[in-house]
Amino acid sequence: MMLEKGRICLKIAGREAGKYCVVVEPQNTSFVLITGPKTITRIKRRKCNVLHLEPTEHKLDIGSGTDLEIENAWKNSGLIEKLNIKLPRFREPKEESKK
């Protein structure tokens, strides 16, 4: 099964099972490079076996495949709300206490 660039998939195995990712680049017939990116779905860029992914009918139009570009594509597509993705909340850095 060959997944094309920009295809949104659901991870069905591993610690990130149940989360959505985007195919950045097909590696060969068994592996693809994926990302969330981490600011959207909490999945960092990594190589993944295609047997651990379930492709959806949704596809993002991504050019070079940088995380910033993919993040903007997610936000412009309206799929965050449609797929009911909860965005991660990042903590603010603690302020230095003044003594």
Image (tube, rainbow, N blue to C red):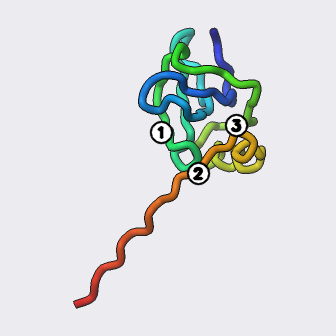
Give me the C-alpha separation between circle 3 and circle 2.
23 Å
Checking the image for residue 61, the label placed there is none
Dot 2, how many residues are within 10 Å of its Cα: few (below 14), some (14-19), or many (20+)?
few
Residue under the image location 53 percent in, 13 percent down: 51
Structural distance between the alpha carbons of marks 1 and 2: 14 Å
Between circles 1 and 2, the one closer to the viewer is 2
Q: Earlier in the sequence, mark 1 or mark 2?
A: 1
Where in the figure is residue 83, as x and y percent of width and height? 70, 39
Residue 96 rendering spot, x and y as whole percentages: 30, 79
Residue depicted at 44% across the width and 68% down the height: 92
User: Mark 2 — residue?
Assistant: 87
Q: Looking at the image, tell me whether mark 3 or mark 2 is earlier in sequence order.
A: 3
Q: Which residue is mark 1?
A: 44
- Labels 3 & 2 near each other (Cβ < 8 A): no
Horizontally, residue 20 falls left or right of residue 49, namely right
For numbered disc 3, what is the local secondary structure? Answer: loop
Q: Residues within 10 Å of mark 3 (few under 14, many from 20)?
A: few
Number of the front mark, 3 or 2: 2
Q: Determine contact: label 3, label 1, CB under 8 Å.
A: no
The amino acid sitting under disc 1 is: Lys
Q: For the residues marked 3 and 1, what is the alpha-carbon distance in whole angstroms?
A: 18 Å
Q: Is residue 12 above or below residue 37?
A: above
Label pair 1/2, CB-CB below 8 angstroms: no
The quadrant in which the C terminus is found is: bottom left
Residue 81: x %, y % from top left: 73, 47
* Image: 46 above or below 70: above
**What residue is pinned by disc 3?**
63
The amino acid type found where label 3 is placed reads Gly
- 96 and 29: which is toward the camera: 96
**Label 1 residue SS:** loop
